[in-house]
Image (cartoon, rainbow, N blue to C red):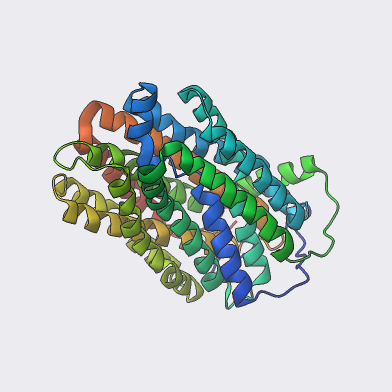
């Protein structure tokens, strides 16, 4: 078990007024999934959008990269404020802003405008990572791993099913309708959370600058936080390498799939999300290191399967399941670990961790698009496999306390 370090400025444990219930966990799981999905609707549509704007594969891939960079900025500068501001007010406001921006994306006249708008959407939908620490605060020590695992299942299901929804909707009504639907869903979610999020007790009065300084201090003084952040970044980079490029592979011969068929692959990937509660139970039993090694190994092995499945949809399906099981397992085990480090500073800790996580995802998206442009599917699988091997090395390192 990690020994908690001394609390930073304002890190006194300040519990919220309402206990964690099963219905609230499920509501927050759905909310994180719907919010995070907004960054991934574009992935199965990249080849269609590229054709619409007369752009290259690499240029279209910037839509996903930009949203992930925006998300990383939001994680760095907005998520730590969850330890300072009332989340019942902060979260709905960010969601309303995201809904307006998604409406702008639906009407984007150029690829440049679409990329810029999606970067701003990424900043606003960090609400998913403001809600996860709330679950960790409300949960008891014995239920924290399972509760975080349930919410992370909702998050990953949102990310993966976004591709299916986008493919089906685009096939029926065009790619712009996908962003219009996302805007409506996000606005509805803002209204629901405004009424469902629990009231919070007053917390220590801290200036925003103090919050940011204490966030940097946490990153500097908590080696296990840095280790988990690097491992998470490697896992999500591998995840993004695959999901940013799979639409390009499946739209070309021998597959020649359209948007709807490509989007259905998200249903396969969603099967991997079911391992989240298993990973949470491993964390609750103190088997984090073993679990992280196993999950990281799944990531590395998945790219061998995906390489062998270059011309086989059956092999690709197996590879997707193995990849998503690994990525989800790493994520749940990492977050269960870092939330134990400093009570009362979970939003800041999550900000540090998830900033690194999505920087890894943005680099993976950009690297995957570049690899496919210059070396095809083989280069994509080599890049993903290398990231998986680096993740195994990081997972195998023994835990360190302050």
Residue 382 visible here: no
Q: Tell me residue 22's x, y (percent).
A: 60, 76
User: Residue at horizontal 54%, vertical 64%?
Assistant: 151
Residue 221 falls left or right of residue 174: right
Residue 399 falls left or right of residue 186: left
The quadrant of the rendering that contains the C terminus is bottom right
Residue 386 visible here: yes
- In depth, the one of 398 and 394 nearer the eye is 394
The quadrant of the rendering that contains the N terminus is bottom right
Q: Tell me residue 58's x, y (percent).
A: 35, 27
Residue 138 falls left or right of residue 289: right
User: Residue at horizontal 35%, vertical 54%?
Assistant: 266
User: Residue at horizontal 28%, vertical 54%?
Assistant: 320
Q: Is residue 285 above or below residue 317?
A: below
Q: Tell me residue 149's x, y (percent).
A: 50, 67
| Tag count | 0
Q: Tell me residue 54's x, y (percent).
A: 35, 21
List the single residue furthest toward the front.
173
- In depth, the one of 30 and 20 nearer the eye is 30
Residue 129 falls left or right of residue 298: right
- In depth, the one of 185 and 202 nearer the eye is 185
């Amino acid at each position: 078990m990690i020994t908690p370090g001394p609390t930073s400025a304002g890190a006194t444990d300040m519990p919220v007024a309402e206990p964690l219930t099963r219905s609230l966990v499920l509501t927050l799981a759905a909310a994180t999934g719907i919010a995070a999905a907004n960054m991934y609707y574009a992935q199965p549509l990249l080849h269609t959008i590229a054709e619409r704007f007369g752009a290259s594969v690499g240029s279209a891939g910037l839509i996903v990269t930009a949203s992930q960079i925006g998300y990383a900025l939001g994680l760095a500068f907005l998520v730590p404020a969850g330890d300072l501001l009332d989340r019942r007010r902060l979260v709905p406001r960010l969601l309303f802003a995201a809904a307006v921006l998604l409406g702008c994306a639906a009407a984007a006249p150029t690829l440049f405008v679409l990329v810029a708008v999606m970067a701003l959407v990424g900043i606003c939908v960090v609400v998913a990572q403001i809600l996860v620490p709330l679950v960790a605060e409300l949960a008891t020590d014995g239920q924290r791993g399972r509760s975080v695992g349930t919410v992370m299942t909702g998050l990953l299901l949102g990310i993966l099913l976004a591709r299916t929804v986008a493919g089906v909707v685009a096939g029926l009504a065009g790619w712009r309708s996908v962003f219009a639907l996302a805007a409506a869903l996000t606005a509805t979610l803002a209204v629901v959370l405004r009424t469902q999020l629990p009231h919070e007790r007053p917390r220590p009065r801290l200036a925003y600058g103090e919050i940011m300084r204490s966030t940097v201090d946490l990153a500097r003084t908590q080696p296990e936080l840095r280790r988990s952040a690097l491992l998470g970044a490697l896992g999500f980079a591998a995840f993004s390498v695959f999901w940013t490029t799979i639409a390009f592979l499946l739209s070309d011969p021998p597959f020649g799939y359209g948007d709807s068929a490509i989007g259905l692959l998200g249903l396969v990937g969603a099967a991997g999300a079911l391992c989240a509660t298993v990973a949470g139970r491993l964390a609750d039993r103190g088997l984090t290191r073993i679990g992280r090694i196993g999950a990281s190994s799944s990531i590395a092995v998945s790219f061998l399967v995906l390489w062998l499945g270059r011309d086989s949809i059956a092999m690709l399906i197996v590879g997707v399941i193995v990849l998503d099981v690994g990525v989800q397992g790493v994520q749940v085990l990492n977050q269960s670990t870092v939330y134990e480090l400093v009570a009362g500073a979970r939003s800041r800790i999550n900000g540090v961790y998830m900033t690194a996580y999505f920087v890894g995802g943005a680099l993976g998206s950009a690297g995957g698009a570049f690899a496919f442009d210059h070396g095809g599917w083989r280069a994509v699988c080599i890049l993903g496999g290398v990231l998986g091997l680096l993740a195994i090395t990081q997972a195998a390192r023994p835990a360190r306390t302050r």
